Image (cartoon, rainbow, N blue to C red):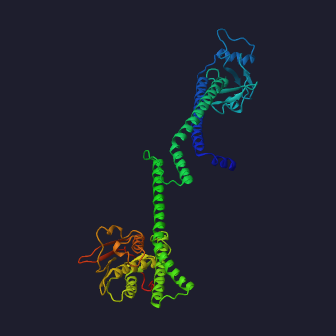
Amino acid sequence: MNRLVRRYRGLPLRSRLALLVTVAVALAVAAVAVSCWILTRAQLRDQMDDSLRSLKVGQGYLELTATACSNTSPSPDGETPPGTTTLFVQIVRPDGTRCVGRGSTPVVVERSDVGVAQQLRAQSLHDAKTDTGASVRVLTQVDAESGYTVSLARPLSEIDDPLNKLALLLTAVAGIGVLGAGAAGLWVARTGLRPVDRLTGAVEHVARTEDLSLRIPVEGDDEIARLSESFNSMTASLASSRDLQQQLIADAGHELRTPLTSLRTNIELLARSEETGRAIPPDDRKALLASVTAQMSELAALIGDLQELSRPDSGTAGDKVQVLALHDLTRIAIERARLRGPELTITADLAPWYVRAEPPALERAVVNILDNAVKFSPPHGTVEVRLDRGHLTVRDHGPGIPADELPHVFDRFWRSPTARSLPGSGLGLSIVARTVQQCGGEVALRAAEGGGTEASVRLPGAPTPPPDTPAP
């Protein structure tokens, strides 16, 4: 059995579908054929039993049979032995002996026949055998006129021969039906799986060539059409992801080229000074070292941002997600921002609000927003921070962002032309957008009334943690 199951599973899907259709039709045809044969057999036997009950044997024939008890005794005048070819007549005595009628074949006396002769039962209807072994249907009952116990028998060959012919006919019809079902099943499997074949070919083509531009035509709205649509969506997503990856690599290479070129130039100047013995003036040497330090810090920040963006999106269902006090986290970020802009005034109005997020990611996002405000604030300017019902706003009084540049502020490596001289990698706001979206929130930048820029972050709330829960 296990071998058959393994062999079945090893067949192609088309062959398995055709085989299943064939087997299902074969079982249905077999059930119909067997039912037809059984019903026909039962009907024929009922007709034979009715014919045995309706037959009447002549009184003179019975008297002669009982008297002579011999097949050679003459029949009474005008009487012919009934059913000399299809009806067997014999009289059964209470002691189990029998008297076979003229022209009849002896039938083996059964116990039920003797019971009728002994008046223990009214009649007996059963199958029996002749002395030669032929099957017969026997009705034994007491003749009302003569009082003899008479057994009337008819050969079952009258039923078996038509039934055998019917069985052959049903077998032939069933065989033709099964063959037709097999052919129809194979045709249905080929037709039904043709879209799957196209899908398989498309998948193999993509695996072989990595051509993600391939699309499968969608026909109808069935499961195969849905599968084709899913495949097209998957390849489109993969193509978009690959394009984004290539764009990220290209942008990262472009951003890395500037600090690396500056580092290389400064280091070559220092090395040439050591090789030639020509000392660089102290002020110039100090400026070179400061530039090297700044470029290395910029590289470190850029690499950190790239690592942050390369992390897989975990949403709010990751193992590191916690319930955080956004007001406390914002307060910590404000203290860090004050260190970067000690001459600025940062005001804070923070109402309690709890969210579900990864602590490092959300803290980095809030710090990036505040750093952006500090970077673009004028000297001795003011940065206003407000948190109310999950709505965090950070407003600066800097030059603001032109309206045509607002749609691009969250793009990776995008930097305003007016800000290219300032430090940064162009990934800060992209990280903010990614983190806020993972938390199920929204982020936007817009021009503030009276000048400057306002960053707006909305985050869904989370249940307040117990009082003894430590702060992040």
Q: Can you say whether 407 is above or below 336 in the image?
A: above
The residue most toward the left is 450
How many circles with numbers are drawn on the protein?
Answer: 0
The residue most toward the bottom is 282
Q: Quadrant of residue 95?
A: top right
Q: Can you say whether 278 is above or below 249 in the image?
A: below
Residue 244 image offset from top left, x and y in percent: 45, 63
Drawn side of residue 161 relative to residue 340, left or right: right
Which image quarter is the C terminus in? bottom left
Q: Nearer the viewer, residue 260 or 282?
A: 282
Asked whether residue 308 appears in the rendered view, the answer is: yes
- Please name the residue shown 47% across and 62% down the image: 241
Q: Nearer the viewer, residue 389 or 416?
A: 416
Residue 388 image offset from top left, x and y in percent: 31, 79
- Please name the residue shown 61% across and 45% down the image: 12
Residue 249 image offset from top left, x and y in percent: 49, 67
Q: Nearer the viewer, residue 350 or 6?
A: 350
Q: Nearer the viewer, residue 65 or 365?
A: 365
- Please name the residue shown 46% across and 71% down the image: 309
Drawn side of residue 249 relative to residue 171, left or right: left
Q: Quadrant of residue 81?
A: top right
Residue 157 image offset from top left, x and y in percent: 67, 24
The residue most toward the top is 77
Asked whether residue 463 appears in the rendered view, the answer is: no
